[in-house]
Amino acid sequence: MDKIFSDKINILKALAITLVVSGHLEFRLFDMFPPYSFQLALFFFISGMLFKDKYLDSVAEFIRRRVKSLLVLYFLYSAFYAVVTVVIAKLTGKFWGMELSWKNFFITPFLNGHQFDLSCPMWFVTQLFITMITFLFFQRMFREKNELFHFIVYTVMGFAAIPLSKMFELTPIFLIIIRTMFSLFFVYLGHLYTNKIHGNYNIFTPKILGAVICLQAVLWHFNRDFDPVHGIGLSYVLVWARFDSQIVVPVLTSITGIWFSLFFINVTYDYLKNIKFIKLVGENTYHIMANHLFVMYIITAVILKINGIPMSERNLHNIYWIFNPVQNTYLYFVLTMLITTYTGVGLKYIKSKILR
């Protein structure tokens, strides 16, 4: 992988996590793409871009690396947020999460990852682990098959996940299956892009841009933009397999969103590559995902204190609530991105010192 392509992937990661944080603040960076309409699919796509075929013959090594890079840090953060949640409960009278138990600490992370509200965005980490291990074994099974066979199998899984989620009861295990089917499709697309499309075909032509805009304009007809009565339309909640009344729209809007993200990076790369902070964001997506709700919680506590409002007001709202969003949304966004990014930088520095 050449350096420019590697740098573009890092900037793409920075964009993806920025979209996640902005989504939790309920505003969008790309106006035609609402929050939750493609951001997680983009992360799975990036994971597929980074998958190396050499691991098809090194299963144990791949699993060891994924455990080290994903699960070890996950459970360290879970232990941290268990303590934080207990402390906050003592101070404010509200316990943000499920009851403390061995099951909720070790099993729930793989079922829904919402054992602690402050770290609930990390549900994606365990699902990514499941998806990538599954992808490895599928690739091993299909290694003698041609690319068309791969494309058909993964496409069928991706598009079948949503109707299947409506046909059967979403038990915890079936929920994992639906999420994995959906996410495997985008991991495959990322792998396909790196190995077959990048460097061989130009998919960022004006005609394709026009086609994507036209398709997204049609898809926008289905958007409800967080309307509690009509549903969320283009957006979907993958962790709970909540696609509302949609069947194919979530897959299509994920594809258009991913393409537009790649197009955006391709067009702006010469400028963005020189911005050090963007590089740091891309290198610290894990820490940003793990900590951004906690940082928002702290920001809210400070604002409430400044305005003389009791902390009990915070307890009346869900974990995503922010104080006076009309005036404060972008303050939350900027502070959260800065604090969580440099938290990641600091933790990596401490780790390097300890290892030395």
Image (tube, rainbow, N blue to C red):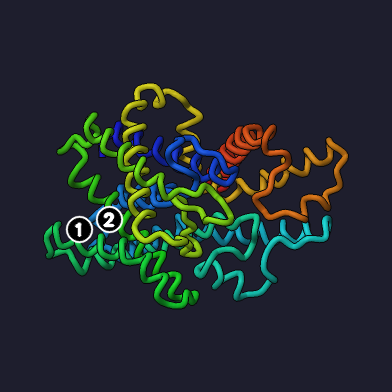
Residue at image coords 27%, 51%: 189
Residue at image coords 67%, 68%: 98
Q: Report how far apart the C-alphas of labels 1 and 2 lie in the structure.
A: 8 Å
- Which of disc 2 and disc 1 is earlier in sequence? 1
Q: Which mark is residue 282?
A: none
Question: What residue would you read off at disc 1?
Answer: 151
Where in the figure is residue 39, as x and y percent of width and height?
44, 47
Question: What residue would you read off at disc 2?
Answer: 188
Residue 348 in view in this figure:
no
Where in the figure is residue 1, as x and y percent of width and height?
26, 40
Q: Circles 1 and 2: CB distance less than 8 Å?
A: yes
Residue depth check, mark 1 versus mark 2: number of the one nearer the observer: 1
Q: Quadrant of residue 300?
A: top right
Residue 352 or 217: which is nearer the viewer? 217
Residue 222 in view in this figure:
yes
From the viewer's perspective, tell me whether residue 276 is left or right of residue 330: left
Q: Quadrant of residue 7?
A: top left
Q: Is residue 159 above or below residue 31?
A: below
Residue at image coords 82%, 60%: 93
Q: Is residue 105 above or below residue 268?
A: below
From the viewer's perspective, tell me whether residue 335 is left or right of residue 30: right
Give the SS element for disc 2.
Answer: helix
Where in the figure is residue 47, as x and y percent of width and height?
36, 51
Residue 30 or 108: which is nearer the viewer? 30
Give the SS element for disc 1.
Answer: helix
Where in the figure is residue 206, as x and y percent of width and height?
24, 29
Q: Quadrant of residue 205?
A: top left
Q: Amino acid at mark 2?
A: Tyr
From the viewer's perspective, tell me whether residue 171 is left or right of residue 328: left
